[in-house]
Image (cartoon, rainbow, N blue to C red):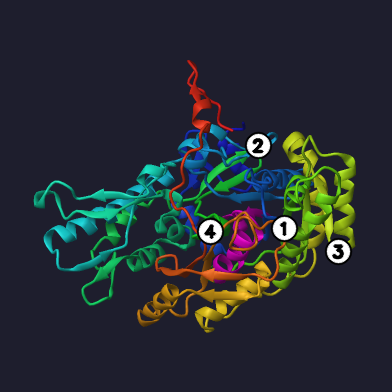
């Protein structure tokens, strides 16, 4: 690795602009405020993906390889990426820093604790929970229902459903409760969409923690919790400067869920990168129907940002899985229908996509050539990406394709729906335009939910549809590009701090569990103090 100050110099930052955290650094408050006033100058590139297999198709590796490829071509570039959660690091999926020769460094440190941002979010979340229970202790008549959960940054299925307050009146009022993983905390989504301290405090004050006896929401502001929570989040609001395998600067900051939230890094980190670099590469969680749509309809709508290009990561492996997973080329050809659906969605936002064909060791030349022929038949640019094995050299082809697209005049923002439209119409527009559904329907419970939320004044908020990431539909058993289906919204909630209505479809877990053979079994610390086994 390069010394972090040498990395900073590549985008015009000095030691006075940073707060050092060993081999990492945070942008200082004066620097962050200066960059906000300076405004954005760079072009933004979004990396998304086709509907993935359970292993993922390599969005982060592609993003890192892409900035390395751009840097090799003489571009002043930065990555703006999400922070990993400890849950997947110790679980099934592994770390979130890319892989091979396209990795964020120091990888183990970023994956485990980074600069402590997720721990600060955990503390702020649980402080609010403690203040809720403290209010109940001294005024039990105030709350009719508590909706705020505690959180922990770990996969722990046994904390999904808990009972708290046991032990008699001296220990509180017993009730059923539960934990979310920190990435699913609304404070994570709130921090990532905040645009400065003032905006963060305003958003924190809107967080709904329960319902009172008059069926009205109780907020964090009502409990006088905002100042203390903001104090805990002060350092966590500052983006983290890291580097790629080849020393390209990267801002790593925030990591909300991509189903119950928007699945993107922070607005503040993205803005700062766009003020420092000519081309900024960012990513959104899961496939385009989840992270990509929310990046555009939520993050971009709230921030005023808009990408100059969308790179869609595709693999022969994922196409085979979507096409029946049989030997030969027929499965890949059938599975390309999933890619085609995502291309249609991206073009619906007025953006011309670029396909990044991630190459794995098991891919044959015949398979890769078939994918390229299918893409050319759709008149879409495609380039092979071998960043995992070859770093920036293996990503120069996709970098060249991106440069060609972003040289064209920028398009104006085009969203899936307008904010003034009714909630039902908003979810219908997303279901039809992005998922390829016939439409969406609300359960009786969801209809009651949205009526109550309208009475509370939340009817004009944008919508965040929470659904499975394994299918374009709300049924994970339907691969490919399903048709003739209806998305069923079973519940509607409000993420008041983040600023969107949450439409829940299917069963969404906000506290994952560990697999039978968790990745935690492979981690260790050497006598030299080096963490090994993080993948």
Sequence-wise first label, 3 or 1: 3
Q: Position of residue 41 (x, y in %)?
A: 65, 62
Tell me the magenta residue range. Answer: 272-301
- What label does residue 92 carry, if any? none
CA separation in Å, label 4 and label 1: 19 Å
Find out whether the residues at labels 2 and 3 contact each other: C-beta distance under 8 Å. no
- Indicate which disc, 3 or 4, sits on the residue closer to the N terminus: 4
Asked if residue 279 lies in the magenta stretch, the reply is yes
- Main SS category, magenta section: helix
* Dot in front, 2 or 3: 3
- The answer to whether any part of residue 106 appears in the image is no
Q: Nearer the viewer, mark 2 or mark 1?
A: 1
Tag 3, which secondary structure? loop
The residue identified by callout 2 is: 99
- What residue sits right under mark 4 in the picture? 259
Q: Return the x and y of residue 4 as percentages of the image width and height.
A: 56, 37
Between the C-alphas of marks 2 and 4, the distance is: 24 Å
Q: Which residue is mark 3?
A: 378
Classify mark 2: residues with Cα within 10 Å, few (<14), some (14-19) or many (20+): many
- Kindly state the secondary structure of the residue where label 1 is placed: loop
Note whether 493 is above or below 334 in the view shown: below
Residue in the image at 58% along x and 67% along y: 300
The quadrant the N terminus occupies is top right
Question: Residue 276 location in percent, x, y?
Answer: 61, 54
Which of pointers 3 and 1 indicates the residue nearer the eye? 1
Say which residue appears at 66% left-offset and 71% top-offset: 437
Decide which of 448, 283 is in the foreground and name it: 448
Instruction: Specify few, some or many for label 3: CA neighbours under 10 Å numbering under 14, 14-19, or 20 or more.
Output: few
Label 1 sits on residue: 480
């Amino acid at each position: 690795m390069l010394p972090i100050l040498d990395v900073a110099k590549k985008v015009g930052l000095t030691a006075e602009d940073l707060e050092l955290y060993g081999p990492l650094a945070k942008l200082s408050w004066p620097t962050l405020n200066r960059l906000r006033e300076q405004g954005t100058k760079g072009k933004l590139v979004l990396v998304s993906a086709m509907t993935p297999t359970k292993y993922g198709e390599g969005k982060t590796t592609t993003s890192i390889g892409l900035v390395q490829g751009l840097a090799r071509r003489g571009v002043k570039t930065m990555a703006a990426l999400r922070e990993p959660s400890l849950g997947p690091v110790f679980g099934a999926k592994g770390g979130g820093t890319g892989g091979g020769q396209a990795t964020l460094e120091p990888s183990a440190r970023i994956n485990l604790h980074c600069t402590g941002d997720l721990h600060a979010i955990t503390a702020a979340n649980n402080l609010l929970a403690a203040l809720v229970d403290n209010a109940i202790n001294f005024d039990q008549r105030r709350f009719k229902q508590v909706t705020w959960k505690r959180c922990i940054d770990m996969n722990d299925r046994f904390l999904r459903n808990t009972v708290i307050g046991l032990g008699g009146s001296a220990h509180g009022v017993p009730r059923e409760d539960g934990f979310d993983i920190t990435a699913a905390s609304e404070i994570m989504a709130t921090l990532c969409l905040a645009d400065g301290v003032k905006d963060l405090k305003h958003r924190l004050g809107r967080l709904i923690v329960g319902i009172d006896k008059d069926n009205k929401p109780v907020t964090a502001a009502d409990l006088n919790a905002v100042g203390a929570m903001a104090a805990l989040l002060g350092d966590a609001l500052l983006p983290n400067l890291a580097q790629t395998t080849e020393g390209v600067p990267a801002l790593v900051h925030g990591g909300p869920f991509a189903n119950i939230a928007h699945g993107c890094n922070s607005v503040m980190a993205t803005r700062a990168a766009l003020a420092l670099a000519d081309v900024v590469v960012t990513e959104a969680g899961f496939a385009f129907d989840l992270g990509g749509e929310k990046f555009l309809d939520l993050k971009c709508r709230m921030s005023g940002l808009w990408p100059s290009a969308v790179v869609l990561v595709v693999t022969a492996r994922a196409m085979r899985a979507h096409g029946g997973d049989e030997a030969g080329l027929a499965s890949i050809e059938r599975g390309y229908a999933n890619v085609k659906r995502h291309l249609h969605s991206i073009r619906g936002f007025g953006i011309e996509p670029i396909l990044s064909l991630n190459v794995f060791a098991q891919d044959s030349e015949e398979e890769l050539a078939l994918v390229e022929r299918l893409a050319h038949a759709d008149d879409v640019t495609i380039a092979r990406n071998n960043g995992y094995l070859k770093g920036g050299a293996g990503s120069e082809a996709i970098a060249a394709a991106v440069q060609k697209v972003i040289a064209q005049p920028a398009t104006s923002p085009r969203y899936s729906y307008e904010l003034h439209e009714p909630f039902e119409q908003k979810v219908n527009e997303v279901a039809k335009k992005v998922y390829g559904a016939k439409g969406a329907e609300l359960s009786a419970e969801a209809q009651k939910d949205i009526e109550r939320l309208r009475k509370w004044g939340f009817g004009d908020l944008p919508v965040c549809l929470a659904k499975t990431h394994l299918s374009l539909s709300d049924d994970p058993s339907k691969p490919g590009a399903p048709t003739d289906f209806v998305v069923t919204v079973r519940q509607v909630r409000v993420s008041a701090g983040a600023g969107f209505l949450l439409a829940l479809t299917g069963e969404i877990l906000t506290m994952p569990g560990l697999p039978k053979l968790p990745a935690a079994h492979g981690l260790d610390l050497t006598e030299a103090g080096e963490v090994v086994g993080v993948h």
